[in-house]
Image (cartoon, rainbow, N blue to C red):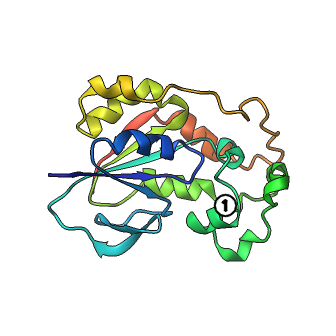
Amino acid sequence: MTKHFYICSYGGSGSYLLESFLKKFGETYHVHSRSLPTEITKVHREKFTKEVEENNQKSFVIYIYSKPAHSLLSRASYGNLHWFNIEVPSSVTHLIPGREEREKYFELKEDLVNYEQFWDNYVFHKSSFPVLCLNFHHLWENLKALCNFCEIDDSNIKHFPQKRNPSHKNNIPEDKNNLFTSLNNKIDTFPEAFIIPGK
């Protein structure tokens, strides 16, 4: 039975890295849906659809996340196309600073992307399937948990890409209005890797 891996994130969280590893073991899907369906559905244009998948596949759903400041400063996770992909309402996207001025996001009075909602929708999901939640900042320390969840022999960990420090690691602007304090506290409180069972 072919394995199907659904790698979900709000971007800037190592999802492509994870996909490059898991595609050796089955079909992979890069997903930016803001919430999970009740049952596993087909994916179209990085979104879960309403078409339920057949029962003849073995599915593994992984939610990988980083602290929002890291996501905002990552190379590919900013701009109107990305906001569309992660379902940011069009009514607010025009209020988000452009790519060249993204540091100004940290001066906003409201987190217009609403990263915390995205995180809550996955961590407190009500779907019928389990979800492995992975903190990207501690991914390499939890590769065994990833392999165990995905039913992959952990001897394959040696093939996982080496950890590299992001170029923006020491250049994150001050969060002047504490936009991300609540979510950062949740991320720090929860384990680095944990499974939310299906309901």
Q: Amino acid at mark 1?
A: Val
Residue 12 screen position, x and y as percent: 60, 46
- Indicate the quadrant where residue 70 lies: top right
Foreground pick, 135 / 155: 155
Question: Relative to the observer, which residue lies in front, 48 or 119?
Answer: 48
Front residue of this view, candidates 29 and 111? 29
> Where is residue 93 shown, x and y percent of the image?
73, 69
> Residue at label 1?
113
* 22 vs 32: above or below: above
Report helix, strand or loop for mark 1: loop
- In the image, residue 113 sits, relative to residue 159, either above or below, namely below
Pinpoint residue 95: horizontal percent, then vertical percent. 80, 68
Q: Is residue 6 left or right of residue 113?
A: left
**Total marks drawn?**
1
Work out whether 104 lies above or below 187: below
Looking at the image, residue 199 sits to the left or right of residue 106; the answer is left
136 or 18, which lies in front?
18
Asked if 3 appears above or below 187 in the picture, the reply is: below
| Position in image of residue 126 (x %, y %) | 35, 60
Residue at x 80%, y 49% (from the top left corner) = 106
Name the residue rendered at 45%, 39% in the picture. 134
Binning the other alpha carbons within 10 Å of mark 1 as few (below 14), some (14 to 19) or many (20 upward) gives some
Residue 199, picture quadrant:
bottom left
